[in-house]
Amino acid sequence: MTGTETLRILRHAIDETNKRIDALYLEVSDIRGDLKKGYI
């Protein structure tokens, strides 16, 4: 495996992680919004 391949794999892993963090952040924002509106 070359250094370039390793970097590409790492970048892909970081991208996937960032997508998951974004999704979690949106979920938390939704829950906060529901709390403020008194739905929960």
Image (tube, helix red, strand yellow):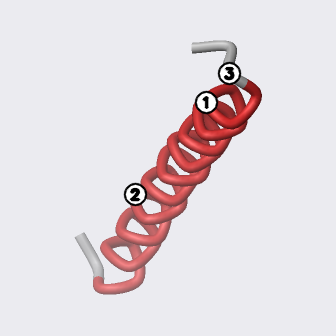
Q: Quadrant of residue 37?
A: top right
Q: Residue at x 68, y 34 (%)?
A: 30
Q: Which of marks 1 and 2 is nearer the N terminus?
A: 2
Circles 1, 2 touching at the beta carbon (< 8 Å): no
28 left or right of 1 in image: right
Q: Quadrant of residue 40?
A: top right
Q: Which residue is drawn at 30% across and 85% down?
A: 3
Badge 1: how crowded within 10 Å, few (<14), some, or many (20+)? few
39 is higher (above) or lower (below) than 36: above
Circles 1, 3 touching at the beta carbon (< 8 Å): yes
Q: Where is residue 4 in the image (x, y as percent from the top left)?
A: 41, 83
Q: For this rendering, which residue is in front, 23 or 9?
A: 23
Q: For this rendering, which residue is in front, 35 or 30?
A: 35
> Most extreme residue toward the left, as rendered?
1
The residue under label 1 is 35
The residue under label 3 is 38
Q: Which amino acid does label 1 sit on?
A: Leu
